[in-house]
Structure formats: C-alpha cells, structure tokens
Image (cartoon, helix red, strand yellow):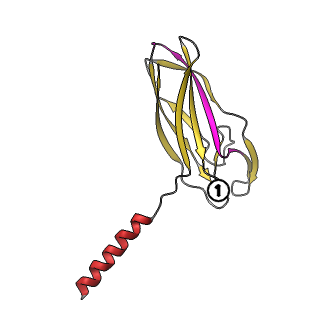
C-alpha cells in the first residue's frame, strides 16, 4: 500500500508541473530593410500582452531594468548611431519612486547599420524587463539574428 501511495504521489506532483506555465508576455520578431547598397535598418519588434509593459532605453538610474541592445562585432557591418525608439509613454511608478518611460502592446526599435559586404548577418542580444500592475518578472536576455540581403 505504501508503494502505491508513493507512486501516486510522484505521478501527481510530476503531472502538476506539466500544467504550470512560465509567464512570457513578450514576443520578439526581427526584420530588415536595405535603404541603399551600403546601409540597412534592423527592426526589433516587441509584441506585449495586454496588461504588461516593457521599459524604454532612456531611464534614469535607480529604476527598472531598461531595454538594451548589444550588437556583436562583425566584419560584415558596423552600427551607425544609437538604437532608436518611438516616444515612450510615461508614468510615476511607486515601487521605483520615479517617472519611467514604457511601452505597451507593441514597440519597434530600429538600428541603422553600414554594410561592409553585400550581405550581412546582424547578431546580438537584447535585455528587457516586463511588468504588470502587480509584479515584475526578472530581466530577460534574448539572442537575435537578422539576415541582410
């Protein structure tokens, strides 16, 4: 009887893990547009579930983790300027005791690159933090890759 109880307990707890969901309210997609023979724009798009938001790249110290982009060094391209973003919404968040810039629903960041070859593979890593009205999830890092042809 003890063996049966132990087996049932193991099955119950291992099965419960199958139904647990890891929250991931942001999905990223990537694109590019060649604007000349030697330049392209890389698009990094965040689609954010209702009720959640991510933060701007332009935040003062002491607040949430800002969205950031790191582009891998390459012989195929060089970055031109900073990664740009649309105008962020702003609100006072009590937990950080400051005004913060944020995005809801969707946001597209853009990075201009100078091509050193006719085609390039633009690789990098982005980091962001996502929050809703009651909690923030730990910062997340995502690798990205965009083919410029």
Q: Is residue 115 magenta?
A: yes
Location of residue 7 in the rendering, given as x and y in whole percent from the top left corner: 27, 78
Q: Residue furthest top?
A: 37
Q: Is residue 120 magenta?
A: no
Left or right: 124 as drawn, with respect to 68:
left
Residue at the image point whose x is 52% and y is 56% from the top: 23
Give the residues in magenta: 101-118
Secondary structure of residue under mark 1: loop
Residue at the disc numbered 1: 132
Dominant SS of magenta comes to: strand
Quadrant housing residue 76: top left
Relative vertical location of residue 130 with respect to residue 71 in this rendering, above or below: below
Residue at the image point whose x is 32% and y is 73% from the top: 11
Location of residue 53 in the rendering, given as x and y in whole percent from the top left corner: 65, 49
Relative vertical location of residue 113 with respect to residue 49 in this rendering, above or below: above
Location of residue 60 in the rendering, given as x and y in whole percent from the top left corner: 69, 42
Q: How many marks?
A: 1
Left or right: 88 as drawn, with respect to 75:
right
Task: Decide: few, some or many residues near mark 1? Use Cα within 10 Å; few <14, some 14-19, many ≥20.
Answer: some
Residue at the image point whose x is 74% and y is 43% from the top: 89
The N terminus appears in which quarter of the rendering? bottom left
Q: Residue furthest bottom?
A: 1
Left or right: 103 as drawn, with respect to 5:
right
Q: In front here: 56 or 39? A: 39
Left or right: 89 as drawn, with respect to 144:
right
Location of residue 87 in the rendering, given as x and y in whole percent from the top left corner: 73, 36
């Amino acid at each position: 009887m003890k063996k049966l109880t132990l087996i049932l307990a193991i099955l119950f707890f291992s099965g419960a893990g199958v139904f647990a969901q890891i929250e991931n309210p942001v999905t990223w997609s990537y694109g590019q547009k060649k604007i000349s023979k030697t330049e392209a724009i890389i698009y990094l798009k965040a689609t954010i579930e209702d009720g959640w938001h991510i933060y701007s790249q332009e935040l003062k110290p002491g607040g949430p983790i800002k969205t950031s982009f790191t582009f891998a060094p390459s012989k195929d391209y060089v970055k031109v300027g900073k990664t740009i973003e649309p105008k962020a919404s702003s609100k006072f968040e009590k937990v950080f005791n400051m005004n913060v810039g944020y995005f809801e629903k969707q946001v597209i960041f853009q990075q201009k690159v100078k091509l050193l070859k006719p085609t390039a593979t633009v690789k990098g890593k982005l980091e962001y933090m996502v929050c809703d009205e009651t909690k923030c999830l730990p910062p997340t890092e995502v690798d990205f890759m965009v083919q410029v042809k």
